[in-house]
Amino acid sequence: MIRRNPNGDIPVVHETAFVDPTAILCGKIIVEENVFIGPYAVIRADEVDENGGMQAIRIGAGSNIQDGVVIHCKEGSEVVIGRGTSIAHRSIVHGPCRVGDNVFVGFNSVLFNCTLGEGSVVRHNSVVEGCTVPPGFHIPSTSSIRSDSELASIQPVTPDQASFSESVAQANRELVRGYKRIRNEF
């Protein structure tokens, strides 16, 4: 469902993107080309800052927002999801937040007030808050990273982890094409 926010902003979705009919996109959202937005995802840009303004939530080309993901922004802050990025099932991305290109965020993870550098991997059930993760870093499953100083123990992404991330992104790009082909069947 595509709908306006109280300010009157309406999502802009590129014609090559696929948004599942059960997903909800509300407000100042920009969805670029070949994006997959899965069932029951909620992307909501509706809170304003103290001056009545808000930044957009932007989903970069070729990215996938999987089933049950929630993306929202506090007080009009910005959320940017880079190109070729995967946000896996039931994750929460809450702005202010910047997620670089070719990032993988695993199931049930939470991102808030943070930046993830290009090619980073956040594995399942992790929390990243209030820090800047450098490009190409791997945050293991069930980690809780809440400051830049806690990043000292984080290792770079291995080739196997990078390959897995790319395979998820590629599978979801195929889903965009498949669902667009059968969209009139449901």
Image (cartoon, rainbow, N blue to C red):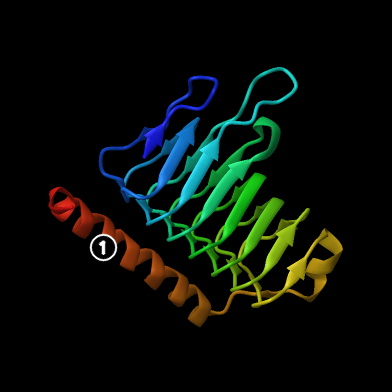
Q: Position of residue 124 (x, y in %)?
A: 59, 73
Q: Residue furthest right?
A: 149
Residue furthest toward the bottom? Answer: 160
142 versus 24 height, above or below: below
Q: Position of residue 179 (x, y in %)?
A: 22, 56
Residue 9 higher or lower than 146, as above or below: above
Q: Residue furthest top?
A: 51
The local secondary structure at tag 1 comes to helix
**Compared with residue 35, is residue 165 higher up or lower down, i.e. above or below?**
below
Amino acid on which disc 1 is placed: Glu
Which residue is at 31% across, 59% downward?
173
At x 71% / y 25%, what residue is drawn? 49
Comparing 19 with 33, the one in front is 19
- 147 sits to left or right of 125: right
Looking at the picture, how far across and down is residue 159, in whole percent? Answer: 51, 79
Callout 1 crowding tier (Cα within 10 Å): few <14, some 14–19, many ≥20 = few
The quadrant in which residue 63 appears is bottom left
Is 107 or 16 nearer to us in this picture?
Answer: 107
Q: Residue at x 44, y 76 (%)?
A: 163
Q: Position of residue 166 (x, y in %)?
A: 41, 69
Picture residue at 54% right of the left edge, 23% below the top: 6
For the N terminus, the quadrant is: top left
So how many labels did they put on this image? 1
- Disc 1: which residue: 174
